Amino acid sequence: MCTLKRRVHFTDASIVDAVRCELLRTANDYRVEIVAYCFMPDHVHVLIEGIAADSDLLKFIRMFRQRSGRRFRKQFGRYLWQEGFFDRFVRSEEATRTVVAYIVANPLRAGLCSDVRDYPFVGSGRFTLGELFDALP
């Protein structure tokens, strides 16, 4: 999900913390697990998984964007999210590990850090940071 006009908002820890809080709260409310996430300066990568038969991933995404966008707009007087987002379905455990590794290594590929362990805006609702870093090749 990209920020509106690709504005750099996710370098500010207080903004990332607020949006991450909404991400995890909304995931809990909609019975979705956040497998991995990474906030890049102007977008966020999130791998989500339904944890109940009636989990609705699209409803979760809509509500997360609404909640985080409303909170951001109230605080800063601007819109946070660009319309739409890119999504795809992961259908196997092996593919999930590949996507987790991709998400976690994103700051390294973008030149934002020399070691992903130093990047502060990576995490998971399922795994510890150590487990996330173990997913890297």
Image: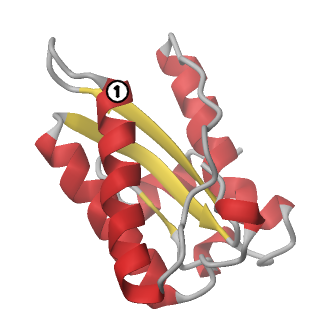
Q: How is the image coloured?
A: secondary structure
Give the farthest residue toward the front: 77
Quadrant the C terminus occupies: top right
Compared to 86, does 111 lie above or below? below
Give the residue displayed 56% in from the left and 41% down from the top: 100
Give the residue displayed 73% in from the left and 56% down from the top: 106
Give the residue displayed 42% in from the left and 63% down from the top: 69
Compared to 79, does 13 lie above or below? below
Q: Amino acid at mark 1?
A: Leu
Q: Position of residue 14 (x, y in %)?
A: 43, 89
Q: Position of residue 96 (x, y in %)?
A: 53, 27
Residue 121 in sight from this viewpoint: yes
Q: Which residue is mark 1?
A: 57
Give the residue displayed 34% in from the left and 27% down from the top: 57
Res 133 → quadrant = bottom right
Compared to 127, does 3 lie above or below? below
Q: Position of residue 103 (x, y in %)?
A: 63, 48
Residue 127 in sight from this viewpoint: no
Res 72 → quadrant = bottom left
**Numbered disc 1: secondary structure:** helix
- Residue 118 in the figure: left or right of residue 137: left
- Residue 26 in the figure: left or right of residue 128: left
- Number of marks in the image? 1
Binning the other alpha carbons within 10 Å of mark 1 as few (below 14), some (14 to 19) or many (20 upward) gives: some
Q: Nearer the viewer, residue 1 or 76?
A: 76
Q: Nearer the viewer, residue 99 or 62?
A: 62
Compared to 71, does 43 lie above or below? above
- Residue 98 in the figure: left or right of residue 60: right
